[in-house]
Every structure is written in structure tokens, then in C-alpha cells.
Image: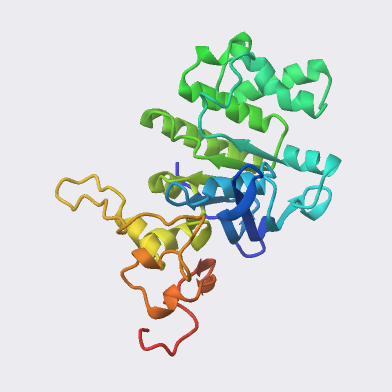
Amino acid sequence: MTTTTVPTQGREVLLNVEMLRKYFPIERGFFKRVVGHVRAVDDVSFHIYRGETVGLVGETGCGKTTCGMTVLRGLPVTAGKVEFRFRDLGNVDVTRIEGDQLKHYRREAQMIFQDPYSSLNPRMTVREIVAEPLVINRIGSAREQEERVAHMMKIVGLDKRYLRRYPHAFSGGQRQRISIARALVVNPSFLVADEPTSALDVSIQAQILNLMMELQEQFGLTYLFISHNLSVVKYMAHRVGIMYLGRLAEIGEKAAIFEAPRHPYTQALMRAIPIADPDQPSGLQSAPGEIGNPANPPPGCAFHPRCDRRMEICSQVRPELVQVGAEHDVACHLYGEPTTLSDR
């Protein structure tokens, strides 16, 4: 199965993120004095069309998981706007809602966690785990909840006779199917999938990815798919965003990102992809050095200490996203203004 191209002209934007920030305070001393901040997500902007999958990629520590948690209001927002298009309320900035509206958003937006071994309560049966969102949101009678849970188990490929068992009785792939059933039981329109296959065997990964794509087609789901595995993102996503040290370095259509990457960091990631051919270079040619410290990021472009194309301006001015093609933006001084530097 391969992903279909989602046309962007006239498409409805389901989620629009503008200048999103999530800073964690650094506290020291007995009185917990704030001496700095970890800039986990720093002025990130992107949008997702309804029915689309946007992949978010980057090295460990780049802020992609924090971005997903913040979008879902699993973490409080430091600054910025997350505008979500509800089926009945229209566009609403979910960073400013509370109470019933927030509960409504959390029915519309669900999460599939990375580790199926720790995301399921070992003291609850499968029936209790999958039914929990229905109970919390008071959806349906007890009988209707039972029927809905059994139906979701069938949809994710598990027999309903497993409902009385506990999580320890299942394999990793089966547990992730249970997690997907729990996320879908309240009929959401948007899912954040945080590396949903990284803890699974390779043979099982393909089954879960295919299941997610089938469910997307069946229910019209929209995904924010977070991963550090470029091959998985290439298989799943329609558009891809590349994060580095809390910021988006590049975002665009999958073909543009994988076939003609613009940002030096994206190009380094592509060179690092292993090649399954003994007669070809092995890949793994990553950028020199290590990812910077989000508590003390480099001035200007955060990637410039590792970039082989850096210019004087790169250490002084932080680049903003500029459009370099249809649905293709890049944050790099190699593109756009200024154009008068001799280094260009």
C-alpha cells in the first residue's frame, strides 16, 4: 500500500499552528529560582489539511514529541496559537479553551503513544482500557459502550474474546492495536501518533502502519505522525516537517523533501539513511558534531555550528521560513533575503 496524494487546492485546514512555543523553566536553589528556560518548541508554525498525514522528523531531543503534546494540550502552551476546526464550532484557538470546550477538543484529538508496554494500565482489562474514554466522557449507556468497544476491537483486527484479558497477555503489536482502538473509540478526527512503531519488531511495524493507513481511509482521519525513522515517514506521510532544536528547518511535500531537500540539515538527514546495497556507500553520513543545547541554543541559525555551508549572517540572524516552492518552506539564509552578501 502506498499513500495517495492529497490535493491542497481548496482543502480544508483542520489544524493551524502559529508561532507555538513551549519553554520549560530551569529552577535552582532552595527557593526554586528560575535561572533559564529549555526551549523545547520555539516559534513553530505549520498547518495540516483534513485527511492528510504530516510527518514530523528530527533527531532525539529536537522537540517533536513536545510539539505533539502541546498541540493536544497535554502540556500547557507558553505562547502561540493552535487553531482547530471543529465539526460544529468552526475554527477555535484551543490554547485558550477550558472546561467543556477542552473536553470536546480531547474527544476530537487523540494520541497513540510510543510504547505500548507502558501506555496501557496493567491492572485494567482490555475492555476497561478501551471503554475508559467513553466512561470519562459519558458517551452512551453501559450496553452501548460494550457494543462500541467490541466493534472497535473488530476494526483493529482483534477478537472480542480478548476483552477480559490483561495487557501482559498480548504481544507488542497486539498492545498497539489496543492503543489504537482506545484512541478511536470516541470517534476523533485528529490523531497524534508519537513514534507508534519504534518499540515493535520490524515485521509487526508494517502491519501497524498499514492498519493506520486503512483506518485513515475508512474514517477520514488526520494524522500528525512523529518519528525519527525517515523510511517510515516516507511511507506514511503526505507532507514532512523537519525539526531541529525546537524549530522547523523545512516543511514540504514528501517528494520535495526526499528528492530535493533544501536545508543543509535535511540534506544531512537524507545522507544518513542506510542503503541496503553492499555495492553502494553505506550512508550514515550525518552532520558533524552534536545537536545543540535547547537551554542555550546557538545564536542565529541553530544549525550553523554543524553546517558546511554557513555564512557570516548565519551566526547573527535567525532565519525564518520562506517559500521555495508550492507547499515547500525552508528556514535558511541560502534562500530568500538578504541577497547582497558576498557569501551568497
Residue drawn at the location 51% of the way across and 68% of the way down: 329
Q: Which percent across, then down, holds residue 295?
A: 52, 55
* Residue lying farthest to the front in this orientation: 30
Front residue of 98/192: it is 98
* Residue lying farthest to the left in this orientation: 279
Q: Which percent across, then down, holds residue 99?
A: 84, 41
**Camera sees residue 150:** no
**Camera sees residue 132:** yes
Residue drawn at the location 59% of the way across and 10% of the way down: 165
Specify how the rendered protein is coloured.
rainbow
Q: Is residue 13 above or below residue 180?
A: below
Q: Which percent across, then down, holds residue 178?
A: 58, 24
Q: Which percent across, then down, holds residue 175?
A: 53, 22
Quarter containing the N terminus = top left
On screen, residue 301 versus residue 179, left or right, reads: left
On screen, residue 93 versus residue 251, left or right, reads: right
Q: Is residue 254 above or below residue 187?
A: below
The number of discs equals 0
Front residue of 26/162: it is 26
Quarter containing the C terminus = bottom left
Residue drawn at the location 59% of the way across and 23% of the way down: 120
Residue drawn at the location 71% of the way across and 35% of the way down: 187
